[in-house]
């Protein structure tokens, strides 16, 4: 079929199929996993809650203030990608890149429908729309979205997301295909800086394969053939080209178009087996070993200097991100002074400051909190909505859906040192057991003299 690579069978084809199945299953099924967080909270295990500016990841909840954790994870993931590339070339591109996975899926549809009375375009449109639906499920409750889309009651934005992502899937996976890898993706341009002579890349053993010729031509004597033979092991069947997703000829050497999928290795090994020659004419190997004309391939060197540099950065970044995740504060509390006026002098000589208190809790069980000032700091607390005009040393507040926005009035009595600007520490405790959940630091303003 024109524009569709031929089918290959072998170890790397099985790895590609198995890994693609896992990735597609992850993409489509994980949004349907449930996670009980209690009432008034999403029950989806992984959810990007854009309206609420939150990310739910199983038992964790992340806010915009946790961006450094995301940076650490991204740096770690990028460093792992560099590590894999320095070891084995573009294995990410060949086995796990979404462009590769979806393009390979559409190629499989073409092959499946070729001799059947099934229009491949209908199957591809269905896959593209399902991809759009799967993408949208990561941002809203998946079962609810499915029911609303089928019932026609979903929000216009939901239909728009499905159509836009579905259209992009069609454009990149059905129309652009290998053009993305050859012309649009920047990653091939980076690989030259990451590879060295010991990196495991798809390599044609030219010392063994040349000169090419039909099987009837006598084999070279140094390969075990007849005296005077001129042919190498390559019989010029072009199967390596026919199965290549980017349609390059690996026999011309390592190229930017090679995505390291290993399908040409499977195709060549199949041909070598049929003609009774040793496998490995095309294989994952290092440039050093290929130049040494060795029949046995070298193993990856994970402890070499360049890969270890990338691995060290990855471990540091991921370790820091994991530590931050395990030590996340159970709540976030902000105490913002209201500047107009900075302070009010009361009739009894006390000084009062007006603050806007904002509390967000991560733990589902947190509902009632106790507020008080730190030891050694004099002052009375009062909520603006409270009927207690005198105030008290401790105040209990109740969260509504794990959040509170309220004006908090703090008064320092007459005789307390309230001149100028002084530090203020508000302690936030769990009202059930007195556990300290956080400390808010701000400034208390008073008259200069």
Image (spheres, helix red, strand yellow):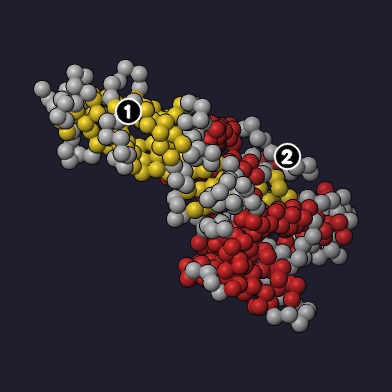
User: Which residue bears the numbered disc 2?
Assistant: 298
SS under mark 2: loop
Earlier in the chain: of badge 2 and badge 1, it is 2
Image: 79 above or below 110: above
**Which circle marks residue 392 in the picture?**
1
Disc 1 crowd rating (10 Å Cα; few below 14, some 14-19, many 20+) is some
- From the top left corner, tell me how far across and down residue 69 is, in percent: 48, 39
- The C terminus appears in which quarter of the rendering? top left
**Which circle marks residue 403 in the picture?**
none
Q: Residue at x 61, y 66 (%)?
A: 146
- Horizontal side, residue 137 vs residue 109: left or right: left
- The N terminus appears in which quarter of the rendering? bottom right
Image: 150 above or below 313: below
Pair 2/1: label in front = 1
Can residue 338 be seen here? The reply is yes
- From the top left corner, tell me how far across and down residue 381 is, in percent: 31, 30
Disc 2 crowd rating (10 Å Cα; few below 14, some 14-19, many 20+) is some
SS under mark 1: loop
């Amino acid at each position: 079929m024109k524009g569709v690579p031929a089918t290959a069978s072998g170890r790397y084809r099985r790895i590609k199929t198995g890994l693609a199945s896992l990735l597609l299953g992850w993409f489509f099924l994980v949004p349907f996993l449930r996670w009980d967080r209690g009432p008034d909270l999403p029950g989806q295990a992984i959810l990007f809650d854009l309206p609420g500016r939150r990310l739910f990841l199983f038992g964790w909840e992340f806010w915009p203030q946790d961006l450094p954790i995301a940076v650490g994870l991204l740096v770690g993931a990028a460093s792992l990608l560099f590590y894999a590339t320095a070891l084995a070339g573009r294995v990410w591109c060949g086995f796990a890149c979404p462009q590769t996975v979806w393009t390979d899926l559409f190629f499989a549809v073409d092959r499946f429908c070729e001799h059947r009375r099934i229009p491949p375009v209908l199957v591809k449109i269905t896959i593209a729309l399902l991809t759009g639906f799967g993408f949208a499920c990561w941002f809203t409750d998946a079962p609810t979205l499915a029911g609303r889309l089928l019932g026609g009651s979903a929000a216009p934005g939901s239909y728009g997301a499905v159509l836009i992502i579905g259209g992009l899937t069609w454009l990149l996976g059905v129309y652009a295909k290998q053009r993305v890898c050859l012309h649009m993706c920047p990653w091939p341009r980076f690989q030259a800086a990451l590879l060295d002579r010991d990196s495991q890349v798809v390599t044609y053993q030219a010392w063994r394969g040349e000169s090419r010729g039909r099987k009837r031509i006598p084999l070279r004597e140094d390969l075990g053939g007849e005296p005077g033979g001129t042919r190498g092991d390559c019989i010029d069947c072009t199967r390596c080209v026919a199965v290549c997703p980017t349609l390059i000829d690996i026999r011309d050497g390592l190229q930017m178009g090679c995505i390291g999928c290993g399908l040409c290795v499977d195709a060549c090994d199949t041909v070598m087996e049929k003609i009774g020659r040793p496998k490995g004419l095309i294989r994952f190997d290092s440039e050093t070993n290929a130049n040494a004309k060795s029949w046995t391939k070298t193993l990856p060197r994970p402890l070499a200097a360049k890969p270890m540099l990338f691995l060290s950065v990855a471990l540091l970044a991921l370790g820091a991100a994991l530590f931050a995740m395990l030590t996340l504060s159970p709540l976030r509390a902000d105490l913002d002074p209201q500047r107009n006026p900075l302070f009010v002098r009361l009739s009894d000589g006390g000084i009062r400051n007006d603050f806007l208190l904002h509390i967000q809790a991560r733990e589902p069980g947190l509902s009632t909190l106790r507020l008080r000032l730190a030891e050694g700091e004099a002052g009375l607390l009062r909520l603006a909505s409270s009927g207690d005009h005198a105030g008290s040393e401790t105040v209990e507040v109740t969260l509504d859906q794990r959040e509170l926005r309220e004006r908090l009035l703090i008064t320092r009595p007459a005789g307390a040192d309230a001149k100028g600007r002084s530090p203020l520490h508000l302690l936030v405790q769990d009202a059930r057991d007195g556990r300290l959940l956080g400390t808010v630091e701000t400034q208390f303003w008073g008259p200069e003299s």
